[in-house]
Image: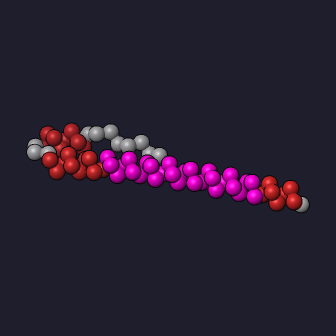
Amino acid sequence: MSEHIWQTFDDLFKTVYRQGRRVEELEARIAVLERHRQERETIVAGAQSPRQLESISEMPAERAA
């Protein structure tokens, strides 16, 4: 019985750790995407001609995580 409890606790701990790492990875990805969005907004705000806007709209889309 005691071994079963410890195995369950161990599995739970590993699951929580894995999920915590996934949350950290997602938070890092959000930070990168937010920085890219701000950079693009800065570029769009500074764009003077339609040609510059075209090149911005042709940037490759971010790969989904």
In the rendered view of the protein, which quadrant contains the N terminus?
bottom right
Question: Looking at the magenta stretch, what is its main secondary structure?
Answer: helix
Residue found at x 68% / y 52%: 14
Q: Is residue 29 magenta?
A: yes
| Residue 7 position within the rendered picture, expressed as x and y whole percent measured from the top left | 80, 54
Magenta span of residues: 9-36
Q: Quadrant of residue 2?
A: bottom right
Residue 48 lies, with reference to residue 8, above or below; the image says above
Determine whether, in the image, residue 7 is placed left or right of residue 14.
right
Residue 36 image point, x, y percent: 32, 46
Asked if the stretch drawn in magenta spans residue 61, the answer is: no
Specify the quadrant of the image occupied by residue 62.
Answer: top left
Residue 25 horizontal side relative to residue 2, left or right: left
Give whichever of 12, 40 is nearer the camera: 12
How many numbered markers are drawn? 0
Horizontal side of residue 19 vs 47, given as left or right = right
For image coordinates 75% across by 54% down, the residue present is 10
The residue that appears at 78% across and 57% down in the rendered structure is 8
Q: Residue furthest right?
A: 1
Percent coordinates x, y for residue 39 in the rendering: 26, 47
* Residue 54 screen position, x and y as percent: 19, 41
Is residue 30 or residue 51 the one in the foreground? 30
